[in-house]
């Protein structure tokens, strides 16, 4: 019986599919990049609570979340899981799924 020839591109696709299945979410991001660099470029959305409402975000820091939501960073006060976060600390404050974020804007009135 003669073996059927598979075009070179098809063999590459088959190997790639097998390779992609072998990568598990438990691998670190540095481990993923050595096997499939394009995976690290994908944003992973996570759920956080912002001012009492559930929201999806791909921000990794509190600073990025403020920008993503369209707030002017200098004109808001922020708290993460009940702890006040200063303007200078926002870039270093990493977000995790399930975090509770409060973003307070000044109000005028009388």
Image: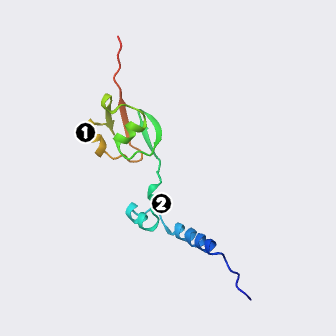
User: Given this view, does label 2 or label 1 mark the residue nearer the observer?
Assistant: 2
Residue under circle 1?
A: 88
Pick the front one: 5 or 36:
5
Residue 84: x, y in percent? Answer: 28, 35
| Mark 1 crowd level (few <14, some 14–19, many ≥20, 10 Å Cα) | few
Q: Decide if residue 90 is on the left or right side of residue 96.
A: left
| Residue 13 versus residue 74 in the image, above or below | below
Residue 86: x, y in percent? Answer: 26, 36
Residue 69, image quadrant: top left
User: Distance of mark 2 from mark 1, alpha carbons?
Assistant: 32 Å
Say what secondary structure mark 2 lies in: helix
What residue appears at the point 35 percent right and 44 percent down from the top-left corner? Answer: 61
What number is the disc on residue 38?
2
Residue 68: x, y in percent? Answer: 42, 38
Quadrant location of the C terminus in the rendered image: top left
Residue 50, image quadrant: top left
| Residue 103 versus residue 8 in the image, above or below | above
């Amino acid at each position: 019986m003669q073996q059927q020839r598979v075009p070179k591109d098809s063999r590459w696709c088959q190997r790639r599919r097998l390779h992609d299945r072998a990568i598990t979410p438990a691998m670190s991001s540095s481990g993923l990049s050595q096997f499939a660099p394009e995976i690290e470029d994908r944003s992973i959305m996570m759920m956080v609570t912002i001012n009492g409402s559930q929201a999806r975000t791909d921000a990794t820091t509190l600073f990025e979340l403020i920008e993503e939501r369209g707030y002017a960073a200098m004109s808001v006060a922020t708290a993460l899981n009940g702890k006040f976060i200063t303007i200078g600390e926002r870039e270093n404050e990493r977000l995790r799924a399930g975090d509770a974020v409060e973003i307070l804007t000044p109000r005028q009135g009388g």
